[in-house]
């Protein structure tokens, strides 16, 4: 699998019309999905683990590529359908300074922590078109039956009291084919 993803600043003319507002929205994705949900919003926790981040994640976070980071993977659900696959990478120093926050999340959305804490700020949003064979594409569809030609995703760094983490959000076809 090819782990490299080409991330760039959002440009409406390069995004699919049905996803442009989702990809460029600077507000809380959790809040928006709760309003959008027909059958009840929930978080399906796929797992937490210590891993080496992807090369582009290490570069974005400015951490050594061999350094283990805390990973949290979830699917953001509408009833029994996943709308978004989210992967958060938390560098070791960020995790160690606030591990109680991450350990208490469970099936709670990370967005509630990020958008209710006054010490949190968001960095720039980047978007990418993901194709079969790319690591994030494959991980996003691991629990899904459908394999579309491409998936679109976004990522942005968040700073909690000056400590960085990176949130990747991959939008699944169930979201924009409704």
Image (spheres, helix red, strand yellow):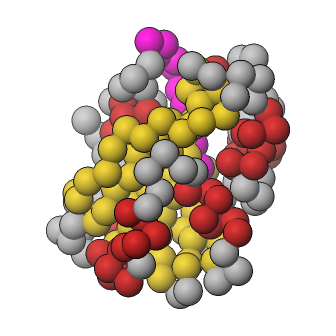
* Residue that extends furthest to the left in the rendered view of this protein: 66
Residue 72: image location, x then y, percent: 39, 52
Task: Name which residue lies at 40% across and 45% down.
Answer: 73
User: Does residue 40 appear in this view?
Assistant: yes
Residue 166: % across, % down:
48, 64
Q: Is residue 15 above or below residue 55?
A: above
Image side of residue 3 versus residue 78, left or right: left
Residue at image location 53% in from the left, 87% down from the top: 162
* Res 8 seen here: no
- Report the quarter where the C terminus lies: top right
Which residue is at the far bottom?
162
The reply to whether the magenta stretch includes residue 151 is: yes
The structure residue drawn at horizontal position 26% and vertical position 54%, both measured from the top left corner, is: 49
Residue at position x 44%, y 61% in the image: 104
Residue 149 is inside the magenta segment = yes
Quadrant of the drawing holding the N terminus? top left
Instruction: Point out the stretch of residues depicted in magenta.
Output: 145-155
As drawn, 92 above or below 103:
below
Q: Is residue 123 above or below residue 108?
A: below
Q: How many marks?
A: 0
Give the image quarter of residue 53: bottom left
Q: Where in the figure is residue 45, as x and y percent of width and height? A: 42, 41
Q: Which percent across, then down, holds residue 176?
A: 72, 24
């Amino acid at each position: 699998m090819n782990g490299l993803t080409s991330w760039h600043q959002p440009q409406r003319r390069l995004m699919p019309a049905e996803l442009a507002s989702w990809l460029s929205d600077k507000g809380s994705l959790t809040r928006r999905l709760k309003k959008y949900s027909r059958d009840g919003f929930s978080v399906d926790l796929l797992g937490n683990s210590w891993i080496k981040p992807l090369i582009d994640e290490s570069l974005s976070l400015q951490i050594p590529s061999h350094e283990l980071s805390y990973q949290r993977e979830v699917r953001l659900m509408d009833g029994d359908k996943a709308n978004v696959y989210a992967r958060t990478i938390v560098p070791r120093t960020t995790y160690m300074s606030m591990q109680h926050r991450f350990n208490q999340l469970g099936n709670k959305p990370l967005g509630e922590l990020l958008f209710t804490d006054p010490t949190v700020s968001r960095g720039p949003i980047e978007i990418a078109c993901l194709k079969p064979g790319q690591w994030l594409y494959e991980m996003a569809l691991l629990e899904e039956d459908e394999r579309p030609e491409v998936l679109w995703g976004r990522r942005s760094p968040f700073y909690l009291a000056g400590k960085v983490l990176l949130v990747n959000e991959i939008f699944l076809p169930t979201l924009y084919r409704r």
